[in-house]
Image: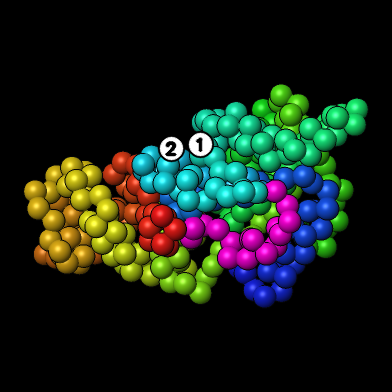
Amino acid sequence: MAIQWFPGHMAKARRQVTEKLKLIDVVIELVDARVPQSSRNPMVDEITAGKPRLIVLNKADMADPAVTDAWLRALKSEDVEVVAVDAKHSKGLKQLITGAQKLMKEKHDRMREKGRNPGPIRALIIGIPNVGKSTLINRLAGRNIAITGDRPGVTKRQQWIKMKGGEMELLDTPGILWPKFEDQLVGYRLAATGAIKDEILNLDDIALYTVRELHARYPEQLKERFKLETLPEDGVELLEMIGKKRGLISGGYVDFEKASELLLNELRHEKIGRISLETPADHEMA
Ligand code: G4P
């Protein structure tokens, strides 16, 4: 989904989430496990203040498992649970429910002591576009539901979607938040993983950022995928070498644009293996 965020849209998105908070017990914040910090909304702590929060590292199937473990440890705090999930293939959904139950345990225990039935946990899924909100809602519901964002001018009654096991109910419209645009590195990380459209940033720049990151973090996977014996230090040379290997030559020169497209395509389709583009240590959180 391509969304243009302007200050008015941001204020509206924020208002919509704030209104829904009154209806729910737990906020489920979805992020991309490959770039958990860059795919967070910069104001999410403030927007969801006071609500127990479950951070879901989605697309864990595409991320480096060791880095995901490090994020699970780094993001957990007293009132924040963190789980890794692969919504597309319905993996990790049990841990997600257990995480939500942990957050509600004290409150539910108190209710039970007073002879009250706590009922299902009511949750709202929030996150920036493309992190997998619709996919997760569908998998948790166990059926395909047409999920639409909040449309301007259309007031729709909130519907609760019952989950398969009955432990939880979800609001049918997820809260769509905006990413942090001001930071160029965040833009590159989101573009490299396909969360934002290539047109927003220059394709060559995204590919150069990506090839440098892969060189620094996953040199062996890069060598193996493109059958390279050594990796030149320089990003431009490395990308040219990849283009040459794949025969992307035009007029005697490597077609840089085609090489850029190829690299990003292969990364996004997991051809280079499981890759994470940021770690807690990058943010001094480890
Ligand atoms: P959104 O509501 O937050 O905007 O995201 P949405 O569910 O539409 O998911 C965006 C893309 O991410 C979809 O791919 C979806 O299949 C994929 N996705 C969601 N969760 C996971 C996951 O855990 N693992 C993997 N590997 N992919 C995931 P798409 O290419 O847009 O659609 P499709 O080709 O899968 O139909």
Please report the residue visible at 45 percent of the width from the left and 48 percent of the height from the top.
71
Mainly helix, strand or loop, the magenta region? loop
Near-viewer residue (115 or 145) = 115
Percent across and percent down for residue 164 are: 71, 25
- Left or right of 126 on screen, residue 239: left
Answer few, some or many: residues within 10 Å of disc 1's Cα (few below 14, many 20 plus, some between 14 and 19).
Answer: many
Residue drawn at point x = 52 percent, y = 37 percent:
85
Magenta part of the chain:
37-52
Spot occupied by residue 49 in the image (x, y as percentages of width and height): 71, 59
- Residue occupying the far right of the picture: 115
For the residue pair 217 and 240, the one nearer the viewer reads as 217
Q: Amino acid at mark 1?
A: Asp
Task: Decide: few, some or many residues near mark 2? Use Cα within 10 Å; few <14, some 14-19, many ≥20.
Answer: some
Q: Give the Cα distance between marks 1 and 2.
A: 6 Å
In the image, which disc is placed on residue 86? 1
Looking at the rendered structure, the secondary structure element under dot 1 is loop
Q: Tell me the kind of residue under disc 2.
A: Asp
Q: Do residues under tags 1 and 2 come within 8 Å of each other at their CB atoms?
A: yes
Q: Does the numbered disc 1 mark a residue whose Cβ is under 8 Å from ligand 1? A: yes
Give the residue number, with chain letter if any, for mark 2.
61
- Taking the image as shown, residue 17 lies to the left or right of residue 235, namely right
Q: How is the image coloured?
A: rainbow
Q: Position of residue 202 (x, y in %)?
A: 38, 70
